[in-house]
Amino acid sequence: GYQRVLEENRKLYNQVQDLKGNIRVYCRVRPQFGAQLNSLSCVDNIDDRTITVLAPTKNGKEGRKSFTFNKIFSPSATQAEVFSDTQPLIRSVLDGFNVCIFAYGQTGSGKTHTMSGPKELTEEGLGVNYRALGDLFELSNQRKETISYEISVQMLEIYNEQVKDLLATDSVTKRYPLYLTYVYLECYISQSGINVPDANLVRVSSTSDVINLMNLGQKNRTVFSTAMNDRSSRSHSCLTVHVQGKDLTSGNVLHASMHLVDLAGSERVDKSEVTGDRLKEAQHINKSLAALGDVIASLASKSSHVPYRNSKLTQLLQDSLGGQAKTLMFVHIAPEYEAHGETLSTLKFAERVATVELGAAKANKDGAEVKELKDQIASLKAALAAAK
Ligand code: ADP
Ligand code: MG
């Protein structure tokens, strides 16, 4: 039963997903507001897959540049529409695929809106994070006769290359940065997928559990940021969903994880104008976003070395960026004309990511295979020890 369910689902996902690769790029254009409502926009034209932006040339002449992605969401796209194109990817985590969804773009372009929603949350306003978990609860409930799922979450913040636990409840974990386990062995990743072992891991089973946790995370974020207004735009925040599924017939257990990442603002900072803490922050952000681009580029070129260890962000996402995992980047565009420089550089970053073609995604190895690999490692270690 279980194997068949897996196979059928996998077939379905493969039909739905673009077969060419495991990295998808969706572009979302934010609406213009208030005074800017009727002003000139740097977005010249949008269709389902192509966006054209105004890109003035150096000598002041007007230019245009087009970019093609898997999907473009116009300013009128609703949260529900955005989610419905993301749902198949999210559902695949229950079949053992690791998934990573991240929101990229300059501050104010709509990253938090897509992932969490507007400040005053309404039912229609709920972002991808809430809808994703709600959907996983529903689907796991539908399968409860054959598979018993446990869903747990962690919430982390990366600020200046330090990882903090947003679900910390005691003053010690609130204060100190956490360590990441460095994962070298693929089977080890598949085994648990937990690479921040000291961060709180909280079991969730309903949307209200999730809302409570998000509120705690938000509160901690505010506590962490007392010294600075809007630290949130200068740190990455990551909601990680860990799934464990036990086949009730065979007893096999699968593990998979999904990272939902609201990245720090991608805007370039004028180095001549910033100093001190602000400069340090900017350098950390540039470094980690560049590391993300480099990791994806080296996966694309099938380089034997993938530089995951160049930033905390890529270390954290390591098991969700690569041949076995499915990745989706939401690229956010602020449509105001003044933003055209940032818009262009955002689209260029996205274009570099979008050209990636990876092999077909594979589900994580199940318990039996992991055990076999572990046994192999143990016997190799024994052989090594004996040889010394
Ligand atoms: P970021 O997280 O990239 O800094 P936000 O998500 O905070 O940007 O968005 C900036 C402002 O624009 C917020 O007030 C947000 O509610 C609003 N906003 C962003 N995207 C949309 C959208 N698609 N529809 C309506 N309002 C949006
Ligand atoms: Mg934000």
Image (cartoon, rainbow, N blue to C red):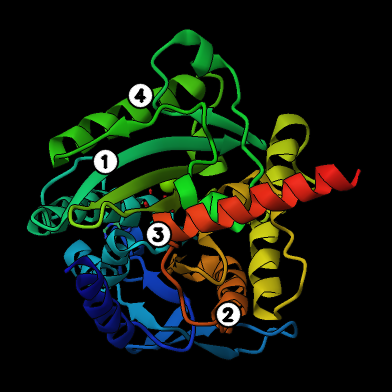
Residue bearing the label numbered 1: 119
Q: Single out the mark in the foreground, 1 or 2.
A: 2
Q: Is residue 340 above or below residue 79?
A: below
Percent of width and height locating residue 312: 65, 44
Question: Identity of the amino acid at label 1?
Answer: Lys
The residues bearing labels 4 and 3 have C-alpha atoms spaced at a distance of: 37 Å
Residue extending farthest to the front is 386
Ligand 1 under 8 Å from disc 1 Cβ? yes
Ligand 1 under 8 Å from disc 2 Cβ? no
Residue bearing the label numbered 4: 219
Residue 294: name its quadrant. bottom right
Q: Earlier in the sequence, mark 3 or mark 2?
A: 2
Decide which of 361, 22 is in the foreground and name it: 361
Task: Report the disc number at residue 366.
Answer: 3
For residue 53, side relative to residue 309 (left or right): left
Q: Residue at x 34, y 39 (%)?
A: 153
Q: Residue at x 28, y 59 (%)?
A: 94
Q: Earlier in the sequence, mark 4 or mark 2?
A: 4
Image marks 1 and 2: residues in contact by CB distance under 8 Å: no
Residue extending farthest to the right is 388
**Secondary structure found at label 2:** helix
Q: Residues within 10 Å of mark 2 (few under 14, many from 20)?
A: some
**How many marks can you see?**
4
**Secondary structure found at label 3:** loop
Question: Identity of the amino acid at label 4?
Answer: Lys
Decide which of 194, 276 is in the foreground and name it: 194
Q: Quadrant of the N terminus?
A: bottom left
Residue bearing the label numbered 2: 351
Q: Single out the mark in the foreground, 3 or 1.
A: 3
Q: Is residue 61 visible?
A: yes
**Secondary structure found at label 1:** loop
Image marks 4 and 2: residues in contact by CB distance under 8 Å: no
